[in-house]
Amino acid sequence: MSDFWASRRVLVTGAGGFLGTAVRDALGPRAPKELIAPSSTEVDLRRADAVDAMVAKHRPDLIIHLAASVGGIGANRERPADLYLDNLLMGTFVLDSARRFEVPKTVVVGTICSYPKYTEVPFKENSLWQGYPEETNAPYGIAKLAQLVQVQANRAQYGQNAIYLMPTNLYGPGDKFNPAVSHVIPALIKKTVDAVESGADHIEVWGTGSASREFLYVDDAAEGILLASELYDDGDPVNLGTDEERPIRDLVEMIAELVGFEGEIRWDTTKPDGQPRRRVDPSRARERFGFEAKVRFEDGLRRTIDWYRANREAAEARVH
Ligand SMILES: NC(=O)c1ccc[n+]([C@@H]2O[C@H](COP(=O)([O-])OP(=O)(O)OC[C@H]3O[C@@H](n4cnc5c(N)ncnc54)[C@H](OP(=O)(O)O)[C@@H]3O)[C@@H](O)[C@H]2O)c1
């Protein structure tokens, strides 16, 4: 470990969330000078005065901005306005406050939901502006992408050191399993585990199964964020991914097998597939700060299923 961290007060927004917990765990052995991790009840980042008060009070050397309103296709369809405005306000205020209080570095975490619906696969960072995102997650994706514009504009005008990272779909222990907000992997794990327990002879799954996704283990994403915090100081956005793409159909079969569900899988084709394909080009992260994902997908899935089985109540209670 370098001594980068020993001299820095690190403020992590969204530190109590899924990715935030993994980032805190990864920060542990790096032993920053101070770790500041306010919850949303302590600081509502949608309020400019609250963000200013937080930054003025703690005077961090590094802000890692993870806080967001997020959800799977269901949440994006039901609450597009909240997902748009919450994320736009939080990102805007955090970056602006960091600039005015001269925070030496700010790391903003975006999302691959910002990519255009039809993008050449693998997604390269240079294609971000070539079209509109997939409709169901566009309000979320656009609000997050506005933060890239702010990062680059603030760099150009004020010389603010801010960077912008885009993890692909995350999974792992600590994920949200409440159907109101869960993403595809926890949703499928819950469905299959419930079916095994109730003895159901089938499960219903959204879409056609033909869409494909890439999944990054949450601890790998946390490592990527900390590597970039330490080693990357440029305005170009950077994907964090694995370069592995899986059809949802294969994913469902893999989860069913790991969970031990042997019944029928029925596809509800009245429900949307979301973006047709997703896989990012991970080469920029490798070249600029040496990031490579380490956890094999099957190992990560096993750990996630084990964690869910051991923590069901808490995993299903969390809605953000
Ligand atoms: N999950 C994924 O697959 C994925 C993929 C790519 C990118 N990302 C990005 O990664 C980041 C973390 O996502 P996640 O999955 O870890 O989300 P999460 O588990 O829902 O955590 C979100 C965090 O944001 C905080 N937050 C929400 N509203 C807030 C507000 N008004 N004021 C202050 N804090 C607020 C929450 O704080 P409290 O818990 O205190 O309420 C929570 O800790 C987000 O920026 C997301 O866009 C996620």
Image (cartoon, helix red, strand yellow):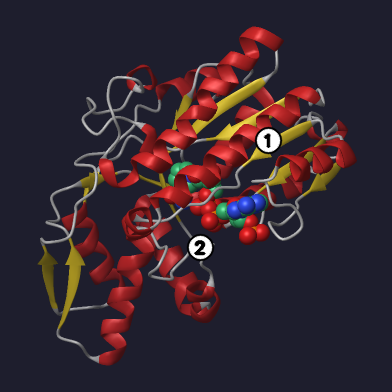
Question: Which quarter of the rendering shows the C terminus?
Answer: bottom right
The residue that appears at 68% across and 56% down in the rendered structure is 40
The residue that appears at 61% across and 28% down in the rendered structure is 228
In the image shown, does 204 or 307 lie closer to the viewer?
204
Q: CA distance from mark 2 to mark 1?
A: 28 Å
Considering the numbered disc 1 on the image, is that residue within a helix, a strand or a loop? helix
Q: Earlier in the sequence, mark 2 or mark 1?
A: 1
Name which residue type carries label 1.
Val
Q: Is residue 292 visible?
A: no
Disc number placed over residue 173 in the picture, else none: 2
Residue 183 position, x and y percent, is 37, 58
Ligand 1: does it lie within 8 Å of the C-beta at label 1? no
Discs 2/1, front = 1
Name which residue type carries label 2.
Pro
In the displayed structure image, the side of residue 162 where residue 264 appears, left or right: left
Considering the numbered disc 2 on the image, is that residue within a helix, a strand or a loop? loop
In the displayed structure image, the side of residue 122 where residue 157 appears, left or right: right
- Answer whether labels 2 and 1 touch (C-beta < 8 Å): no
Crowdedness near tag 2: few (<14), some (14–19) or many (≥20) residues, C-alpha within 10 Å: many
Residue 258 position, x and y percent, is 30, 70
Q: Is residue 81 visible?
A: yes
Which residue position holds label 1?
A: 94
The residue that appears at 77% across and 57% down in the rendered structure is 42
In the image shown, does 58 or 233 lie closer to the viewer?
58
| 186 shown above or below 147 | below
How many numbered marks have been drawn onto this rendered protein structure? 2
Question: Which quarter of the rendering shows the N terminus?
Answer: top right
